[in-house]
Image (cartoon, grey):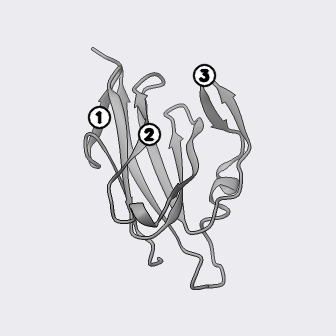
Amino acid sequence: KSDLNAEVWTNKGSENLLFEEGEILKLFVRVNMPAYLRIIYYMADGSKVLWFDNYYIDQTKVNKVIQIPDEFECAEPFGYETMQLSAQTKPFKALQTEKKYGYDFILEGTKAIVQNTRGFKKVTNKDKSTESRLNITTFKKQ
């Protein structure tokens, strides 16, 4: 737990999220201090997509609702998915990715993803981090 707080929600809120094929997902965030954001989407087939990395929220945008610039259309694979927002006061270490279908698929395992954001570390006044997740169910249009 740190003094850094990050909230994330969609155009449909943050709970009981259901998106049907073709629907558009918009993301909104709010942080209480300047921070770097990383957004990872864990797809139903086990793929991990890096939506944003080191997206910086500066002092002028602190405590304001910020819409993430890209919008996302619900498409296959369908099922239970998770969107993870990580925020920290220092830039994230780069992840190995491969561009496919216009997205950056993460080639590394979960250990590499969380390596810089979890575990015991020496406490300093300047390094802060937090995480927030949204659970999303996607399904084929009937």
User: What is the tally of numbered marks visible in this picture?
Assistant: 3
Q: Nearer the viewer, mark 1 or mark 3?
A: 3
The answer to which quarter of the image holds residue 78 is top left
Ranked by sequence position, the earlier of labels 1 and 3 is 1
Residue 136 vertical position relative to residue 59 in the rendered view, above or below: above
- Mark 1 vs mark 3, CA separation in Å: 23 Å
- Which disc number belongs to residue 63? none
Q: Residues within 10 Å of mark 2 (few under 14, many from 20)?
A: few
Q: Please, what is the three-letter code of the amino acid marked with disc 3?
A: Tyr
The amino acid marked with disc number 1 is Leu
Query: For the view shown, which residue lies furthest in the top direction?
Result: 142
Instruction: State the residue position of label 1.
Output: 18
Residue at (48% x, 51% y) in the render: 84
Task: Give me the residue at 49% from left, 67% from top.
Answer: 34
136 to 1, vertically: above or below = above
The percent coordinates of residue 25 (x first, y second) are 35, 34
First in sequence, mark 1 or 2: give its number.
Answer: 1
Per the model, the C-alpha gap separating discs 1 and 2 is 21 Å
